[in-house]
Image (cartoon, rainbow, N blue to C red):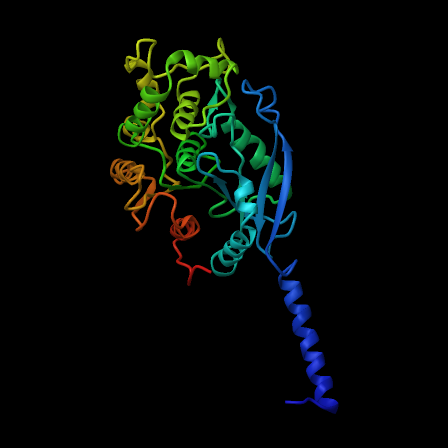
Amino acid sequence: MAIHGTNWGKFAWRLSFWILLLAWQSPGLAARLEVIRLESHMLRGNPLHDPAVRSIAIFLPSQAVAGAPLAAIYYLPGYGGSPDDFISRSNLWLDFTQSLAEELTPLALVVVDGRTRWGCGQYLNSAAQGNYEDYICDEIVSAVEAKYPPVTKGVRRIIAGHSSGGFGALRLGSSRQTLFDAVIALSPDSDFPVSHLRLVQIAAVSNAPLAEIEQMESGALPPPKDGDLMYAVGLSAAYAARGLSGPGQFDWLYDRGGKFRDEIWQRWLDNDPLTIVQRNPHAFASGQAVYLEGAAHDEYLANIGARAIFEVMRARPARCTFYEPPGHHGDHIRERLQRGVEWVFEKPLKEVR
């Protein structure tokens, strides 16, 4: 339909008014990605000589304004993952961030880089690899909040992750209870006798005598090409570091004769989130929300550990739930993360974009 004369003038005025109003209500008009390069004091001089300068990806909704309060999800990728994986699919995560803002509340999605020579540091402090907990909780949070301060009411910070990142979310949520109001653990590494032991035994016995592991530790040999063995080495560096007397070194699960070392396995178990909640009734604070999840057909049986943690915690003051979606370990991460965020805020979204 054509618009003529004075009718056009009225139409144009009204259109201009609504455009200006929309621009005022939605700074930037669209979700956006900010990538910051952070030089970490915590990782400087780490025993593996891994980079101290890391990129952090921050996905922001259109409503986010520098200097204005904003809640945040600090997301820990799975083993070997990084912000690069999220940046390469930025449209997906920008849509995710914007849908949360429009239907739930404005949130920044902050994706962390926790990679090491061995693939991932499990997001822990360890003399065999570096202080990744402190890097995340003290440096990354401070860097983000210098520009986007946290909200003062309700949920301020969520620590979330998948697989190794789900393990990290549980561990950091437990050790930094006043920092993180909620935890979202998707297929977390837990219940190590179920999820880890067989995999590590096969990788170690078939591929790696102790002498070879020691050469990898010293740098005389490169990291293994076998993925399962690489994983076993990385977990050893996270859970069985020798301490400050041997920076970069860890104790292997097998001795020179190939015998399994129960005392070293116990150090692994001491890091198991299931062991931690079984031993410590205050592993999570009463004010925290803990979302546990594992896919029904998880190849690594992470759903079993997540459910076991829930069974221990369900009678405790912390708000906790467990959900078992269909699919496999790495399926539909975005949708699963959204479901966790919905539960934390007790408000389901209309749909996944």
The residue at the point 52 percent across, 24 percent down is 131
**Against 313, is 201 above or below?**
above
* Residue 228 percent coordinates (x, y): 38, 29
In-image side of 106 versus 209 (left or right):
right
Locate the N terminus and report the quarter of the image it occupies.
bottom right
* Residue 70 percent coordinates (x, y): 56, 48
Q: Is residue 242 visible?
A: no
Image quadrant of residue 352? bottom left
Front residue (pair 110, 257): 257
In-image side of 351 versus 280 (left or right):
right
The residue at the point 39 percent across, 44 percent down is 330
**Against 266, is 292 above or below?**
below
Q: How many badges with numbers are in the image?
A: 0
The residue at the point 51 percent across, 60 percent down is 102
* Residue 168 percent coordinates (x, y): 43, 33
Q: Is residue 256 visible?
A: yes
**Against 126, is 166 above or below?**
below
* Residue 43 percent coordinates (x, y): 58, 24
Front residue (pair 62, 228): 228
In-image side of 206 versus 214 (left or right):
left
The residue at the point 52 percent across, 52 percent down is 93
